[in-house]
Image (cartoon, rainbow, N blue to C red):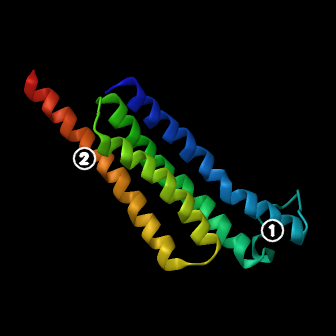
């Protein structure tokens, strides 16, 4: 793996972490509209407008997707996966997760589901490429 590819994988992990909180900005605007209660911030969920509720769900799902993607990207990094497919999968993951949140907040379920599937495929691709790379390294020993 050349240095540029490894840096891209690491930047994609950072970008995916930042994307977790992007939907939360929309939740915050919804909370401002209903009046933020510091003593019971979760109790106000049912009072939020529908777009802010969907943003909450996008935010929560982003944590779940991030854990899987991070494991896959770190495996690619550790195994020295140097294919353009691996770097492309990492970049695509970040893009589709951004679109996932947008489509979730805008209530476009088919597009949201498609983005979820593509993001999952990106993580799966990184896992498979990493395992193949590790397997090939064992054969060389």
Relative to 107, say whether 129 is above or below.
above
Classify mark 2: helix, strand or loop.
Answer: helix
Q: Looking at the picture, how far across and down is residue 128, in whole percent?
A: 25, 47
Of residues 55 and 15, the one drawn nearer to the viewer in this rendering: 15
Of residues 99 and 27, the one drawn nearer to the viewer in this rendering: 99
Residue at x 45%, y 65% (from the top left corner):
116
Within 10 angstroms of label 2, few (less than 14), some, or many (20 or more) residues?
Answer: some
Classify mark 1: helix, strand or loop.
Answer: helix
Residue at x 50%, y 55% (from the top left corner):
95
Task: Assign the N terminus to one quadrant of the image.
Answer: top left
Which of the marked residues, 2 or 1, is nearer the chain's N terminus?
Answer: 1
Residue at x 13%, y 27% (from the top left corner):
138
The Cα atoms of the two marked residues, 2 and 1, are separated by: 40 Å
Of residues 40 and 31, the one drawn nearer to the viewer in this rendering: 31
Relative to 50, say whether 116 is above or below.
above
Dots 2 and 1: beta carbons under 8 Å? no
Q: Looking at the picture, how far across and down is residue 29, in whole percent?
A: 82, 64
Residue at x 39%, y 65% (from the top left corner):
117
Q: Is residue 55 left or right of residue 61?
A: right
Q: Is residue 135 left or right of residue 124?
A: left
Residue placed under numbered mark 1 in the picture = 30
Q: Looking at the picture, how far across and down is residue 46, in whole percent?
A: 76, 76
Residue placed under numbered mark 2 in the picture = 128
């Amino acid at each position: 793996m050349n240095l540029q590819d490894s840096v891209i994988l690491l930047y994609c992990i950072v970008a995916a972490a930042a994307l977790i909180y992007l939907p939360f900005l929309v939740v915050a605007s919804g909370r401002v509209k209903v009046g933020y209660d510091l003593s019971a911030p979760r109790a106000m969920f049912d009072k939020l407008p529908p777009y802010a509720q969907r943003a909450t769900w996008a935010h929560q799902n982003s944590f779940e997707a991030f854990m899987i993607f991070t494991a896959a990207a770190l495996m690619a990094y550790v195994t020295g996966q140097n294919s353009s497919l691996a770097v492309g999968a990492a970049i695509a993951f970040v893009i589709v997760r951004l679109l996932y949140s947008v489509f979730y907040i805008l209530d476009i379920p088919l597009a949201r589901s498609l983005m979820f599937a593509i993001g999952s495929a990106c993580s799966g691709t990184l896992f498979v490429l990493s395992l193949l790379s590790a397997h090939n390294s064992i054969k060389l020993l």
